């Protein structure tokens, strides 16, 4: 660890008195105004969205419905929450080698002309389909043609009409290109080369990661609908002119995208490393359950992680690199997740305005193709 980082950690540890005032046990209630949400400005906007959605859902009753969970407030907040799901899924996949055999048709004997991942993923989707997963507008199967026909053993769920009812919009499914990029771009970037024969575990983690990534990029439909409703005339004019680049420009918010990238890198740095146990006081030594020293140490860890996230992963901090390189996670968001989401948004907006999207916006390609990730150096 660099001298600067050590000094930073020491400085934060010496601030335990101030931390105690802000984070006393009595203030750590379940209230949505808890300092846990307001202490870090980077997450403040996301926290406000989460708090708003939670307050809306629980204001009148302890129970909430499917309709509540797909409100626009909840959609905004869940995009933030999905970052943890995706990052943890990628961390889980990174513990295994690439194990290319699981992606090859016939690579694992006994499955015929099917890859191990196809077998596992399609089987999982069949099971989930039986309990109505793919009736949700936020879920999309990788192998929809293999799903069993629905029976009437379970009631239909009541989903709000947040999207256009156009069948072509419902059919938008970017999983083909996501599947290809996951196998050929993401896995080589996060997993060591070679084979460790952990094929079943590898496919379990692949399935979790693919489903999380699919859910995230297809939320572009909801984002596109929200943006359309905020400026229907502007999008209609561009679509009528066949100006896909103009649609892309109008829907792009560079500031928000940069915030997403910073947050992804910071979360990957925090979640993908072991805690500094040498700086963490033992809870058994804390009098009367006093958590002040523990909170101070945790704050120090968070500060050091934040600084490291902003460092170039090629410097002397490499020796502290965690389970997955934060720069790789950021690159996955910058070069794959965000572009795929925006490609879906453009296709959605064309259909929403009554025209077929340009052929470049198809589910088997990306507008800007990516063959290999290019992690950028932090400033």
Image (spheres, grey):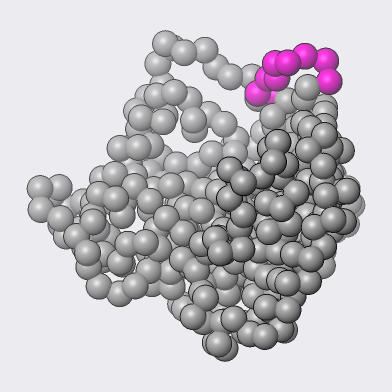
Q: Is residue 39 above or below residue 8?
A: above
Q: Which of 303 and 40 is in front in this view?
A: 303
Please provide the residue range marked out in magenta: 59-67
Please identify the residue farthest to the bottom as the structure is shown. 315
Which quadrant is home to the C terminus?
A: bottom right
Q: In this view, does 131 lie to the left or right of 64?
A: left
Residue 138: x and y in percent read 59, 39
Residue 227: x and y in percent read 81, 50
**Quarter of the image where one finds residue 75:** top right
Q: Which residue is drawn at 82% across and 34% down?
A: 26
Q: Residue at x 55, y 17 (%)?
A: 156
Q: In this view, does 246 lie to the left or right of 143?
A: right
Q: Which residue is drawn at 68% across and 51% down?
A: 294
Q: Which residue is drawn at 40% across and 40% down?
A: 144
Q: In this view, does 296 lie above or below 76?
A: below
Please identify the residue farthest to the left as the structure is shown. 110
Q: Does the magenta stretch include residue 342?
A: no
User: Would you say the magenta stretch is mainly helix, strand or loop?
Assistant: loop
Q: Which of 276 and 112 is in front in this view?
A: 276
Q: Is residue 253 left or right of residue 354?
A: right
**Would you say residue 234 is visible in this rendering?**
yes
Residue 210: x and y in percent read 45, 52
**Would you say residue 337 is visible in this rendering?**
no
Which quadrant is home to the N terminus?
A: bottom right
Q: In this view, does 50 lie above or below 251?
A: above
Residue 173: x and y in percent read 52, 48
Question: Total of numbered circles in the picture?
Answer: 0
Q: Nearer the viewer, residue 65 or 159?
A: 65
Q: Nearer the viewer, residue 300 or 147?
A: 300
């Amino acid at each position: 660890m660099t001298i600067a980082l050590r000094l930073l950690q020491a400085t934060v540890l010496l601030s335990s008195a101030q931390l105690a005032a802000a984070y006393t046990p009595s203030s750590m209630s379940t209230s949505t105004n808890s300092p846990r949400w307001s202490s870090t400005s980077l997450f403040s906007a996301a926290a406000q969205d989460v708090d708003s959605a939670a307050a809306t859902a629980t204001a009148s009753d302890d129970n909430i419905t499917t309709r509540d969970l797909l409100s626009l407030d909840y959609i905004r907040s869940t995009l933030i929450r999905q970052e943890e799901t995706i990052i943890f899924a990628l961390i889980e996949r990174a513990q295994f080698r690439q194990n290319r055999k699981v992606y090859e048709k016939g690579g694992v004997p006994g499955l015929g002309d099917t890859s191990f991942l196809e077998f596992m993923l399609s089987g999982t989707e069949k099971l989930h389909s039986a309990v109505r997963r793919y009736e949700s507008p936020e879920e999309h199967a990788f192998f929809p043609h293999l799903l069993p026909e629905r029976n009437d053993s379970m009631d239909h769920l009541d989903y709000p009409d947040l999207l256009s009812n156009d069948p072509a919009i419902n059919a938008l499914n970017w999983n083909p290109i996501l599947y290809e990029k996951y196998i050929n771009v993401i896995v080589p970037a996060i997993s060591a080369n070679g084979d460790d024969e952990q094929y079943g575990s590898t496919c379990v983690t692949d399935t979790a990661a693919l489903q999380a990534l699919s859910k995230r990029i297809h939320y572009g439909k909801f984002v596109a609908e929200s943006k359309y409703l905020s400026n229907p005339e502007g999008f209609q004019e561009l679509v009528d002119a066949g100006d896909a680049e103009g649609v892309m420009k109008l829907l792009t918010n560079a500031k928000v995208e940069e915030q997403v990238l910073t947050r992804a890198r910071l979360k990957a740095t925090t979640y993908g490393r072991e805690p500094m146990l040498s700086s963490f006081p033992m809870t058994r030594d804390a009098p009367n359950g006093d958590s002040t020293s523990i909170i101070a140490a945790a704050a120090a860890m968070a500060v050091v992680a934040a600084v490291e996230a902003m460092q170039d992963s090629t410097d002397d901090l490499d020796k502290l690199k965690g389970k997955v390189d934060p720069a790789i996670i950021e690159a996955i968001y910058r070069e794959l997740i965000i572009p795929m989401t925006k490609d879906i948004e453009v296709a959605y907006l064309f259909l929403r305005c009554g025209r077929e999207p340009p052929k470049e916006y198809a589910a088997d390609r990306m507008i800007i193709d990516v063959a290999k990730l290019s992690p950028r150096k932090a400033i």
